[in-house]
Image (cartoon, helix red, strand yellow):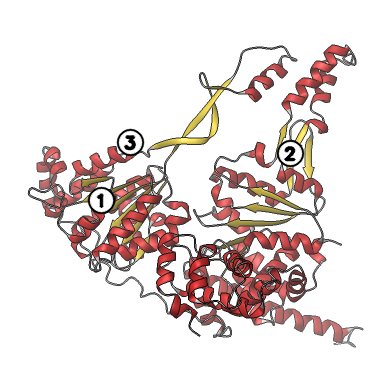
Amino acid sequence: MEPSEAFSSAADLARRLGETGYLADEALSTVGWLALRLQRPLLLEGEPGTGKTALAEAIAQTLDIPLVRLQCYEGIDATQALYDWDFPRQILHLRALQATGGDTTGGLEEVEDQLFDDRFLLARPVLRALRESPVVLLIDEIDRADDEFEAFLLEVLSTWQVTIPELGTITAATPPIVVLTSNRTRELHDALKRRCLYHWIEHPDLERELAIVRSRAPQVSAALATQVVAAIQRIRNDHQLIKPPGVAETLDWARALQELGTSTLDVETAAASLGAAVKYREDAERIRAALDTILAR
Amino acid sequence: MSSPPPGMPAQALTLRHREVLHQADEMLLGFARALRSAGVAVTADRERTMLEAVAAVGFHDMGATYLAARATLCGSPADLERYDQVFVAWFGGVRAGHSPKPPPAAAVQVAPLHDGEGDGEATGESIHAIASATEVLRHRDVATMSLAERTALAGLFAKLAPQAPQRRAHRHTPAHRGRVDARATLREELRRMGEPGSIRRRRRGLRPRRIVLLIDVSGSMTSYADSLLRLAHRYVTNGTPVEVFTVGTRLTHVTRALRQKDPERALVTAGSMVPDWSGGTRLAQGLAIFQQRWGRRGLARGAVVVLFSDGWERDDPQALGEQVRRLQLLAHRVIWSNPHRGKDGYLPVQQGIVAALPFVDDFVSGHSMAAFEDLIGMVAHA
């Protein structure tokens, strides 16, 4: 089935994602469903640890299609995102031809054709996604790449095709599902944003986060999970923190406490294991000082 | 008026249906327009996508319409806030769950950026006097200048050509010396049908380093704010990777406003964005918000941060020291430009400065054109 037709409604998408352990709220599932239905890339922004990357993984899992991931970094260019020729193997092939004295009768042109054959082509994530579609193409942390790279992506995302001079144009049979994530270290170009559906992912509320912990870390007891999530929610409300803990930190903390054999979270155990949830010294000091109010019912 | 054609009821239904749809589209497009006038960059193609998206979720479902239109019309967190306000105003608070924040007090007491033009005659006269005294003007304290002198000074800013400092890039570029570039060497060999040839080399290239300008616009800095924004405008228009913020009681991102070529218009636009001209200083808080919302995400990482302030801190000076310390951990270099530094007999005794000074890489003056030129040189070689 076409991915765009796979889900009957936003609620259906939310339910199916829930089966994989990804609990999306109404806003996210509506926007996600629209992205699939309208075949538009989905641009997700939000604090680190709110599940931007996990959404792409969950969609791939529900649809049972591969996930192709392109991690962006400064200086990334088309040879790392799109395709490259395998030069050493081309040379080897050339040498092998010379050594065997074989098949060069066709002249220069034929040798060249052999060299720029599909088997010497190294398909990088974007090309792979176009060829193997339907897939989920995750373009992670696009804000780390340079502006020029955005312009290049724009071309691929609007036409779903790529031209390789030696081989010709490669077009996706069905457009891949594209999820872009950004941490907002810089403002993305408006042209790229216009192509995408935009969604800002918030930290989950208490109920949802509890449900996430219960589904992702089932070994943690219900009572402990409730305490941990309540504490995390209070910690997050302190806007003075350098880095408020994300959902990943909540899970780490709950698992850590479970491993330590804790059944109820008290000031001592919390202080001892806080390193799983808070990663800055200043934050840790601030929270330790306020632990009794954070843990108060 | 003969007998009605067969299938009339169905047709009428479609017509009525269409009418309803048409009304919905009109309403949505009106909403998009209202959003545009509220400052969200809504383009025609975004409008079209919005209509498609709303049609997909169904216009009758207000909650889904809210989400569908938001995903298609917005592009940044700042847009989301405005979107909520306009949505409530347009569709009448249907979405109770998303309580709109009160609109920001629009353009509170915007102090004039420059005190207006002097009358023609006076300007003419003083230009004549100043033309021979540009050198004097360069070293004069901006705060003590007359109107005419300021106008002449504004012209001098156009001559500034600020450059960004360089850093080593991640990417390699071909070079005559450096490490062997195996790939390029092989490619070269391939071109000669496998005949070995000269060895290609590569080296890591250079890239401009990001600059962040934080301009204090509180009451005590009023007389310098105009010049500092002009300096920032030169940085922005000269193509350096720079981000400009004003700090007073609030933090305002003004880079976009300063992108306009014409300095006067850029300054007026920037001025209208800043809600806290000549107010108090909450420098520590402003720096904290800057780091939380921008700096730590990567904006200040490895950047050259220039802070223009006199260091009068209304709140706890220790907090300012702490914020500057954190900033220094993130940034490549922290430069503090203080207008009073250049004056005779100045001692850094304001508590804010005292607390912050240990964490500042360079402490420079920032009161005159000559000081700005020095600063530009310092940033370019940071």
For the N terminus of chain B, the image quarter is: bottom right
Q: Is residue B167 above or below residue A126?
A: above
Q: Is residue A158 above or below residue B191?
A: below
Looking at numbered disc 1 in the image, what kind of residue is underneath it? Pro
Which mark, by number, is residue B82?
none
Q: CA distance from mark 2 to mark 3?
A: 42 Å
Identify the residue position indicated by label 1 in the image. Answer: B358
- Image location (x, y in percent) of residue A114: 84, 24
Quick check: do tags 2 and 3 share a chain? no
Identify the residue position indicated by label 2 in the image. Answer: A163
Output the chain of dot 3.
B
Q: Residues within 10 Å of mark 2 (few under 14, many from 20)?
A: few
Q: Quadrant of residue B60?
A: bottom right
Residue A103 visible within the image: yes
First of labels 3, 1 by sequence position: 1
Q: Is residue A171 left or right of residue B294?
A: right
Looking at numbered disc 2 in the image, what kind of residue is underneath it? Thr
